[in-house]
Structure formats: C-alpha cells, structure tokens
Image: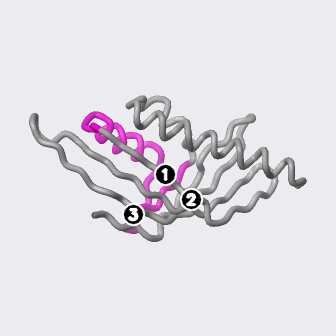
Amino acid sequence: MSKLDTENVLKEIDRIHQFSFEAIEQKRFDNYITIFSEKLTYKQGNGKIIDKKQITKDTKVYFNRLKTVKSKYQRKDYSIEGNRFTEHLIQKTTVSIKVFFFFTKKWTIEREATYKWYKIEDNWKIEKVDIFKENVY
C-alpha cells in the first residue's frame, strides 16, 4: 500500500472516530451504532464477549441517561492489510449520567484496546474490539 493510500485510510478512520464522538455527545444513538459491523465481537475489560445485539441494548440504556461525555484517543500502532485495518488505541472518556431526577454521577474511563475494522461496500465498520486494560475512577 502506498503512503498516500495509508494516509487516506487513517483519515477515513479518524473521521469515523470523530463522527462517533459527535454522535455520543449529541445523543444520536442511531448514528453511533452504525460504526459497528453486524458481525461484531466485543471483548469487554472484564473478559466478557458480547455481540452487536448486546452492545446495542447496553448502549441504548446509557444514552437515555447520558448528560455529558468527552472523549479522546491516541493511536499507538496500526496495520493495514487489504480491506482490514487494525489499531491499538488508548482512550480517555469522562462521562456524567443522570441518577434519579436531581443527581449526576461522573467518572472517567481509561482503556487500552485493539480495534479491528473491515471495509464493507466502501464503509469501514468495527468488527472486533478487544479491551485489554481498563481503569475507571
């Protein structure tokens, strides 16, 4: 793959990350969930593996309670093989949610994970996530 092709793939993936962050911040659940493949396998920090159906259900619950969220990431490494893109990210996200009617709970999540993307019909989708380090405080 040429340097230009690599740069274009990185720009596409970064654009999707930005799209997903904006969807979360603006509570646009239907937009957010589109970044995941129907064949998704998502290994959580506790080792439990869930599919797209489960992450959709879980995420919808949080979106309904979400008050604010700020997220950023740093790409530590990546590889490209044809229509597959793998990246090693460190993410930091600060979230606040509504608790009961008058209270807000706030916490920060730092996680390190591998994301495997697959290009389907000119669209990159996350097909596999493996969270191997997660701290919540």
Q: Quadrant of residue 100?
A: top left
Question: Dot 1 corresponds to which residue?
Answer: 72
**Residue 30 place in picture, x, y as percent:** 45, 29
- Three-letter code, disc 3: Lys
- Three-letter code, disc 2: Gln
- Three-letter code, disc 1: Lys
At 73% from the left edge and 62% from the top edge, which residue is drawn? Answer: 79
Secondary element under disc 3, as helix, strand or loop, is loop
Quarter containing the C terminus = bottom left
> Is 32 left or right of 66, judged from the image as shown?
right
**Residue 39 place in picture, x, y as percent:** 57, 47
Among numbered discs 2 and 3, the one appearing first in the sequence: 3
Q: Is residue 56 one of those drawn in magenta? A: yes
Secondary element under disc 1, as helix, strand or loop, is strand
Magenta residues, as a range?
Answer: 40-67
At 52% from the left edge and 64% from the top edge, which residue is drawn? Answer: 113
Q: Which mark is residue 48?
A: 3
